[in-house]
Image: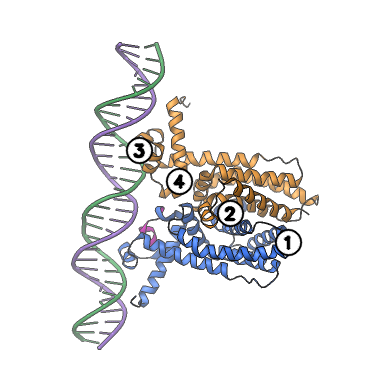
Chain colours: A blue, B orange, C purple, D green
Amino acid sequence: MEKKRSRIQIINQQKVLEAGTEIFAKYGFRGATIDQIAEVAGMSKPNLLYYFKNKKEIYIGVLEQTLNKWLQCLMEWEVTGTPEETITNYIEKKFEFSRDHTAGSRVFANEILEGAPILKTLLGEDLKRLVDEDTRVIKGWIKDKKIRPIDPVHLIFMIWAVTQHYADFSAQIETLTGKTLADEVFYKQAKKTVTQIILNGVLI
Amino acid sequence: MEKKRSRIQIINQQKVLEAGTEIFAKYGFRGATIDQIAEVAGMSKPNLLYYFKNKKEIYIGVLEQTLNKWLQCLMEWEVTGTPEETITNYIEKKFEFSRDHTAGSRVFANEILEGAPILKTLLGEDLKRLVDEDTRVIKGWIKDKKIRPIDPVHLIFMIWAVTQHYADFSAQIETLTGKTLADEVFYKQAKKTVTQIILNGVLI
DNA sequence: CAAATAATTTACCGTATGGTAAAAATATAC
DNA sequence: GTATATTTTTACCATACGGTAAATTATTTG
C-alpha cells in the first residue's frame, strides 16, 4: 500500500524526471551522473536521492514515463478511415511526438543502443501487441487491394525510423540545414515530404 | 614527420579501434571506460594507453575511421543511370553499410545524441558537400520531370533514417521480429520493401 | 650475441561518482 | 503554538575511473 504523495513530493519527483530525461537523452544511463541531473533539477544530490533511491530508479522512472507517452501516441490513431487518411494521421502523430518529446525520444534511442536492458521485456509485450495490431490492419488493406502488397512491419519501421530520426539526429540535421523540427516551416515541409513519399509509395 | 609504425603498433592500434568501436557503440563517449575497451582489445589499460594517449584520442580515432567509411559509402553511388537505378543502388549501399558496420553506425548515433561535439565541424564540411551534391542531382531529376517534385533533403534524410534505424535500433527490431540484418532473408525483405516504397514514392 | 628500442606489466595517484548517516531546517497537523 | 513528520543540508565514505612512473620483458637491429 503506497502512502499518498505530498505536494512537494509530486513537484520534486516530476522535476527530477524532467532533468533526468534531459541528461539521459544526451549521455545514456552509464554516461549520465546524478550530480548533473540534480543540478538541472535545481537540488542537491542527497536531496534528489531522498526522492529516488538510486540512479537506476531515476532512469526507470524516466523510461516508464517516456514509453507510456510513446505507446499512447501509437494507440491514438483512427483505423476507421481510408488508408490514406489513416497513414497521414499516423505519420502526423509520430512527427508531433518527435517535436514535442525530443529528449524522451533520445532517452529511448540511448536505451536501445545499450541493448535495451530495461525496456526489452516491455517492448516484447506492449509494443509487440501494438505492432501486431497495426500489421493486421495493413494486411487487411492489402487483401482489399487498397494499398500495394508491401511487408507491413517494414512500413511501420520506416515511419518510426524517419520520425525518430528528426528527433535523435537533430544535431546532424541542424548542422546540414540550419533547421530543426522547432522551426514551423521546416517541420511542415518535413512532414509533408515524408507523408507524400510514403503515401505514393504504398497507395495503388 | 610521423615515425613509421611498427608491425605490432599497426595490429594493436587496430585492435583498440575495433574494441573502442564496440564499446563506444553501446555506451557513448562518457559511458565507455578505458578498462572496458582494454579488456575487449585483450590488453591491459596502461598498455592500451601506450598506443593512445587518452580516452578522447581513442574516440577520435574511432570516429574518424567510421566517418571515413560512411563518407566513402555515400560517395560510391553512380549518378549516371536512371533515377530508379541510382536510388536503388544508393539504398542498397546504405543497407550494406548498416549490416556490415552496425557498431560504427551506433558510435555515430551516440556522438550525434551527445550533440556531435567532435563531429559537428566535419559534418558541416565534408557531409554538407555531399548532401549539396546529391541535392543538385535530385533537383535535376525533378526539373526533367523524371521524379515527383519532393524536397530533396528530406528524401535523403528518409533514406539515411531508415537504413540507420536497422543498425541502431536492431535491439528493438530483434525483440519485435526475432530477426536482424544479419538474417539474409530478413535483410533482403527489408531492403526490398524500403526500396519499393521509396521508388514508388518518388517516381512519376 | 649484444646494444638499443619497443612493448608490457606492476604499482600507483588524484579526482569523479554513486551513495549514506545524521543533523538541521521546514512544513504540516493538531 | 507545539509536536510530528517531512524535507533539505552538511559531512562524509568506498569504489570506479582516467591517467602516470618506473621497472620488466620482448623485439629488432647492428
Residue under the image location 59 percent in, 56 percent down:
A161
Crowding at dot 1, Cα within 10 Å, few <14 / some 14-19 / many 20+, comes out as some
Disc on res. B24: 4
In this rendering, do the residues under marks 4 and 3 share a single chain? yes
Task: From the image, tell me which residue sits under label 2.
Answer: A174
Task: From the image, tell me which residue sits under label 1.
Answer: A203
Q: What residue type is labelled 2?
A: Glu
Crowding at dot 3, Cα within 10 Å, few <14 / some 14-19 / many 20+, comes out as some
SS label for mark 1: loop
In the rendering, at what x and y percent does residue A184 appear?
63, 64
Q: Which amino acid does label 3 sit on?
A: Lys
In this rendering, do the residues under marks 2 and 3 share a single chain? no
In the rendered view, does B29 fall on the left or right side of A142?
Answer: left
Q: Which amino acid does label 4 sit on?
A: Phe
Quadrant where the image shows the C terminus of chain B? bottom right
The chain to which mark 3 is attached is B
